[in-house]
Amino acid sequence: MTNTQSIPWAKPTLWGNEQSYVVEALNSTWISGGPFVERLEKEISRYTRSPFALTSSNGTTAIQMAYLALGLKPGDEVIVPGFGFLAAANLALQSGAKPFFAEVDPDTWLVTAPEIEKCLSPKTKIIVPIHSYGNVCEMDEILELAHNHNIPVVEDTAEAFASQYKGHQAGTMGTIGTFSFQATKTITTGEGGMVVTENKELYDSMALYRSHGMLRKKYYWHELPGNNFRMTNMQAALGCAQLECLEKIIAERKRVSTQYRKLLSGNDGISLQHFSDTVKPVVWAMAMKLDTAAYPQGRDKVIAQMNDLMIETRPGFYCPSFMKFYASPKLPVCEEISEQVISLPTYSTLSDKQIEFICTSLVDLQRGS
């Protein structure tokens, strides 16, 4: 197969009522908050079976709302994995807290309870497992450890919406779960996010922080120093339309990940991310490690070579020990994964022929060719 058009790394798909719902929101004059925001919260609550769901302006502010509600303060410590998108670590630093980075499992690339336990101290305030690429951490062990030490768990589920662990929706097992609906995610509102929880007190606190600390019982009266983390009605309209097509989106994403695994499993130069039997993933991005013997040119050169073939790929998440301001100790497992992982195009409308071309191209680059 000859590629005549570039293949992007990600591409949002509008499946049905996105345009009509956004126009409806625009015409209603409810441009900031509005009925679609409330509808999206109710539908996410129903889908995840979480009593309380609250929209936010993005996945990062969802984590920030969780930190604020849990009382994170300067001098506290937050345990996060050393491999994963570093929003949770960045927010800890901005809060005056210190992120402690735990090693991850070399096969799943996810943080585990034993590695979290190594990072515990009397100052540990929050544990943040990150469900990278649609995989889900072994939550039973993490929750047991957290319970034994009376530490809340904030699940960073930005990349794992609709994935499941032992029949539970990812993001619904910890104290608070956070989601992202950014443009590349499983469902999108362009930007936007969500928090879910079973704790009414935490929900009320996050709702206050989301909207300037005002209860709206008395205009311009602030109960606490809040922020503006609100999602717009137009964004929520887009999300409601996406959610209507969720089962189709899940089915297509599973087709894409299954086809990749079919074509790349068994190749000695490529190690696919491992998913436990306890996990039913909805893969956000198809990622794999490239063996240095099979790819002596290195992962970054492979990315450039794939780009020459008009295939956009991305590296793995850079380990915090590579960036001085995190003050992280060496993390050998995270560093190896960080330097060897490549993420291939992953979106619902990617065709089987395109996947075949991507896989053939990647394999043909082995041995430095």
Image (cartoon, helix red, strand yellow):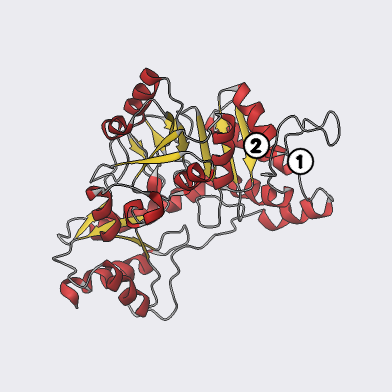
SS under mark 1:
helix
Q: Residue at x 51, y 57 (%)?
A: 184
Q: Amino acid at mark 1?
A: Pro
Q: Position of residue 86 (x, y in %)?
A: 43, 49
The residue lying at 26 percent from left, 49 percent from top is 330
- Tell me the residue that label 1 is attached to: 35
Q: Determine which of the numbered discs, if any, sits on residue 127 in the image.
A: none
| Residue sitting nearer the eye, 37 or 59 | 59
How far apart are labels 2 and 1 at the CA level?
A: 10 Å
| Tag 2 near tag 1, CB within 8 Å | no
- The image quarter in which residue 194 lies: top right
Q: Amino acid at mark 2?
A: Glu
Residue 249 sits above or below residue 152 on the image = below
Whether 138 is drawn above or below 307: the answer is above
Relative placement, left or right, of 313 versus 277 is right
**Quadrant for the N terminus in the image:** bottom left
Residue 149 found in image quarter: top left
Residue 340, percent from left and from top? 26, 60
Q: Nearer the viewer, residue 225 or 345?
A: 225
Residue at (59% x, 58% y) in the render: 14
Image quadrant holding the C terminus, namely bottom left
What residue did someone put label 2 on? 41
Taking the image as shown, residue 268 lies to the left or right of residue 196, namely left
Provide residue 64's location: percent of width, then percent of height.
56, 40
Q: Earlier in the sequence, mark 2 or mark 1?
A: 1
- The answer to whether 40 is drawn above or below residue 114 in the figure is below
Where is residue 73 shown, x and y percent of the image? 53, 33
* Residue neighbourhood size for the residue with mark 1, other residues' Cα within 10 Å, grouped as few (<14), some (14–19), many (≥20): some
Could one spot residue 185 in this view of the protein?
yes
- Front residue of this view, candidates 357 and 303: 303
Label 2 secondary element: helix
